[in-house]
Image (spheres, rainbow, N blue to C red):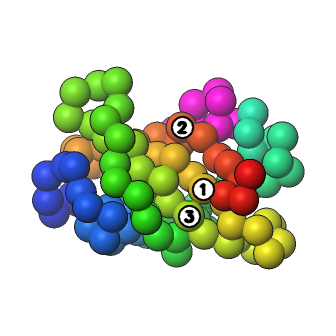
Amino acid sequence: MLTSTQPWNPGQATTEIRAIARSNKLDLSYKLHARERLAERNLIASDVLYALKNGFVFQAPIPATRPGHYRYRMECRTPNSGSRSIGVVVIPSKAGCLIKIVSVMWIDE
């Protein structure tokens, strides 16, 4: 699924993460921290998926704890977030259609 090796610049990351999120083979996994932040902010899983399909990466990637993997933050206003933008920190898998959701945050906080 992924067409280039990581790390990606923000434009490449936006394109690659959107493609993975729109795939019929998408496999999302949530860290406990991300699930807690969703509940704390009264957001739902569909907000995360919407942000992954329609959001943008504006910042450079940060290396993840596993070598060869990187964290990216997709930013987007979602149907359930009102006029506020959310950030979804993700680690896309190099092999396959896996996206690990690390955290979810309000961008304006």
**Going 43% across and 64% down the picture, which residue do you hit?**
57
Which residue is label 1 attached to? 87
Query: What residue type is disc 2 on?
Result: Val
Query: What residue type is disc 1 on?
Result: Gly
Element under label 1? strand
The Cα–Cα distance between marks 2 and 1, rounded to whole angstroms, is 11 Å
**Residue 104: image x %, image y %?**
64, 47
Give residue 76's quadrant in the image. Answer: bottom right
**Residue 56: image x %, image y %?**
47, 70
**Going 35% across and 41% down the picture, which residue do you hit?**
62
* Mark 2 or 3, closer to the camera: 3
Q: Is residue 16 visible?
A: no
Q: Few, some or many C-alpha atoms within 10 Å of disc 3 (few <14, some 14-19, many ≥20)?
A: many
**Going 22% across and 49% down the picture, which residue do you hit?**
7
The Cα–Cα distance between marks 1 and 3, rounded to whole angstroms, is 4 Å
Q: Is residue 17 magenta?
A: no
Q: Few, some or many C-alpha atoms within 10 Å of disc 1 (few <14, some 14-19, many ≥20)?
A: many
* Range drawn in magenta: 26-35
Q: Few, some or many C-alpha atoms within 10 Å of disc 2 (few <14, some 14-19, many ≥20)?
A: many
Decide if residue 41 is on the left or right side of residue 22.
right
User: Relative to residue 72, is residue 69 depicted above or below?
Assistant: above
Picture disc at residue 100: none
Which residue is label 2 attached to? 102
Q: Is residue 27 magenta?
A: yes
Give residue 40's quadrant in the image. Answer: top right
User: Relative to residue 23, is residue 5 depicted above or below?
Assistant: above
Q: Badges 1 and 3: C-beta atoms under 8 Å apart? A: yes
Which residue is label 3 attached to? 75
Element under label 2? strand
User: Relative to residue 109, is residue 64 depicted above or below?
Assistant: above
Element under label 3? strand
